[in-house]
Image (tube, rainbow, N blue to C red):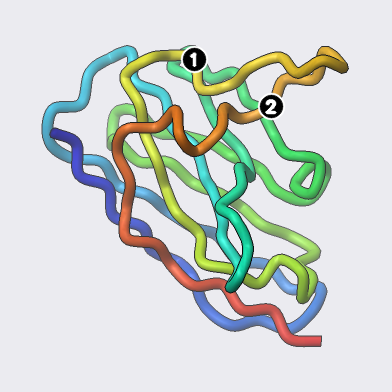
Amino acid sequence: QVQLVESGGGSVQSGGSLKLSCAASGRTTSRYCWGWFRQAPGEERQGVAAIDADGSTSYADAAKGRFTITQDRAKNTMYLQMNSLQPEDTAMYYCAADTEDPCGVYSDDYTYRPRPPSDFTYWGQGTQVTVSS
């Protein structure tokens, strides 16, 4: 089992920044990959960004150019730096991990994107991000 704990959420004004962290513990392996997902009220959970064991990254269109995913595998910690936040970014943000690396997949337009939520085995409890206009 792998346990994931998110932190860093909060309330910011439009244009502000937040940095989320996800700490992994338990039976982590060298080949796990992980990512960030978000879910707004009444909407489906959607991918934001993912990072593979080799450091390759994938982003959803809404995150490109504003969010950056990184990892420190020595600390078993993943980060999501979010800049230029907008009200539509308001959601519960979840960290997820899977042992089936990579966590990205090429879409029909040859863009490397996060795998769907159903592909991920381990999930954190989430951290709320609220952006006010």
At which x and y percent is residue 11? Answer: 59, 83
For the residue labelled by badge 1, is the local secondary structure a helix, a strand or a loop? loop
Q: Which residue is mark 2?
A: 113
At which x and y percent is residue 67? Answer: 70, 48
At which x and y percent is residue 39? Answer: 56, 61
Quadrant location of the C terminus in the rendered image = bottom right
Between 114 and 16, the one nearer to me in the picture: 114
Of the residues shown, which amino acid type is indicated by label 2? Arg
Q: Which residue occupies 61% across, 47% down? A: 46
At which x and y percent is residue 43? Answer: 63, 63
Q: Which residue occupies 35% across, 26% down? A: 98
Of the residues shown, which amino acid type is indicated by label 1? Pro
Identify the mark at residue 102; answer none if there is no mark.
Answer: 1
Q: CA distance from mark 2 to mark 1?
A: 11 Å
- Left or right of 98, for residue 11: right
Q: Earlier in the sequence, mark 2 or mark 1?
A: 1
- Left or right of 39, for residue 95: left
Q: Quadrant of residue 72?
A: top left
